Amino acid sequence: MTAPLNYRHLYYFWVVAKEGGIARAAERLDMAVQTVSTQVRLLEQSLGHALFRPAGRGLALTEAGTAAMAFADQIFALGEQLRTAVADAGTGQGGRLAVGISDGLPKLVVHHLLKPALGDSRVRLLCHEDEFDRLLGDLALHRLDAVLSDRPAPPNPNLRVYSHALGEAPLVWFAPAKLAAKCKNPFPQCLAEMPVLLPTAHAAVRSRLDRWFEQHGMRPRICGEFEDSALLAAFGRAGLGAFPASRWSRKDLLADKGMQVLGETPELVEHFYLISAERRIQHPLVLRLVDQDSGKQK
């Protein structure tokens, strides 16, 4: 029978790998160099492979060490989550929800998607925005509980993540009322008469927007392209041009009395997904997000 893994030895290995050498690790751990070296050697004996090789004045991971480090990162990240979860439970807090927000996801939609998990004022929500691929990596390492995106996760045999559809919403076109008043043609032809603001290719809907313009024989005068949808809307509100946004953003955008709806494009739909590291979700707050009937909400 294989002996159980000694997690103290694994922790010393992890610190040595992070610091790039035994001496620096020993200083961080406030331990003797010989003690740290012995603990790492015992782990190597237990696993049956060398985990480090000399590299200049320090150490570098072997292939076996790289594989071990990937698991060590996950194990100690989960350890931090365990500490937080126990503290939350012990103080009667409603729970912690760490969510990655894809940089292509419209920010005005994020609150709509997260609303089912925010009914309890004790919930502690942590939102982290980043590039889609980097968020998926953090999710796979259990640094995040879920990722919200405008596209499903791509097939990747090395990344065990699962996509859950949260719903969809058609695009609505908004414009400053002063710009709209100068147009002679009805929607959508009026878009050819005014400057237009669009999302960059970071947004999954951009390619569909380009095809839509082509199908209508229009070559819009694009005066701005934005990765951040909130920034796009801010420039639109400032009078720079017309822009598309999810129907779910309608109430927020029309709170500005200087804005008006040009028209709706039901053939242009944004899709929204929650991506989890589990096929069968266990986190109760993530379950609330997946169970919402988003597709029927207006």
Image (spheres, grey):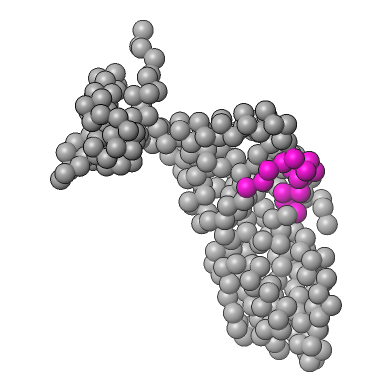
Q: Nearer the viewer, residue 202 or 205?
A: 202
Which quarter of the figure has residue 55?
A: top left
Q: Is 57 placed left or right of 245 in the picture?
A: left
The percent coordinates of residue 296 (x first, y second) are: 82, 50
The percent coordinates of residue 130 (x first, y second) are: 53, 56
The percent coordinates of residue 219 (x first, y second) are: 62, 83
The percent coordinates of residue 13 (x first, y second) are: 31, 31
Q: Nearer the viewer, residue 184 or 214?
A: 184
Task: Count numbered badges in the picture.
Answer: 0
The C terminus, quarter of image: bottom right
Q: Nearer the viewer, residue 88 or 151?
A: 88
Q: Residue, x 82% and y 65% (percent of image)? A: 251
Which quarter of the figure has residue 283?
A: top right
Residue 235 colored magenta?
Answer: no
**Is residue 198 in sight in this rendering?**
yes
Q: Is residue 234 above or below residue 6?
A: below
Q: Residue, x 75% and y 73% (percent of image)? A: 173
Q: Which residues are magenta?
A: 112-126
Q: Is 46 placed left or right of 205 in the picture?
A: left
Residue 122 colored magenta?
Answer: yes
